[in-house]
Image: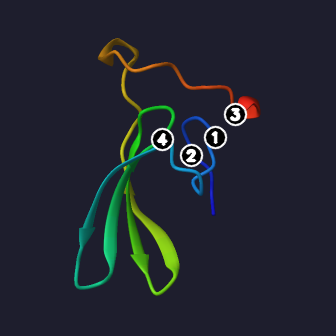
Amino acid sequence: MSDCPYCGWPDDRPFRNLSRHPTEEGVLNWTRCACGSVQARLLTSGTVRIVTRGRPASADAGLPACPDRAAS
């Protein structure tokens, strides 16, 4: 799997799971990256595909800064 294009956090290690929704195609899982970016992940037949990704939260949104990837 890839890494977040904004902070380099590994996509296969979601920082926070937000919600899960069953769909006709599989399960749609909304997650948040360490930088605040939100992703929609579609889980189907044992595969995970990121179908959309938002931009990171702004610094004044009250979220912590991106952790150093080396610390992960």
Q: Residue furthest top?
A: 60
Q: Tag 4: residue type? A: Cys
Callout 4: helix, strand or loop?
loop
In the visual, does 35 lie left or right of 62? right
- Dot placed on the residue nearer the N-terminal end, 1 or 4: 1
- State the mark number for residue 46: none
Q: Is residue 20 above or below residue 66?
A: below
Q: Residue furthest right?
A: 70
Q: Which residue is mark 2?
A: 4
In the visual, does 56 lie left or right of 21? right
- Dot placed on the residue nearer the N-terminal end, 4 or 3: 4
Q: Which residue is mark 4?
A: 33
Q: Is residue 28 above or below residue 52?
A: below
- State the mark number for residue 69: 3
Q: Tag 1: residue type? A: Gly
Q: Which residue is mark 1?
A: 8
What quarter of the picture does the N terminus occupy? bottom right
Q: Position of residue 32 (x, y in %)?
A: 41, 43
Mark in front: 1 vs 3: 3
- Dot placed on the residue nearer the N-terminal end, 4 or 2: 2
How many marks the image carries: the answer is 4
Dots 1 and 3: beta carbons under 8 Å?
A: yes
Q: Residues within 10 Å of mark 4 (few under 14, many from 20)?
A: many
Q: Position of residue 46 (x, y in %)?
A: 51, 82
- Separation of residues labelled 1 and 4 (CA atoms): 10 Å
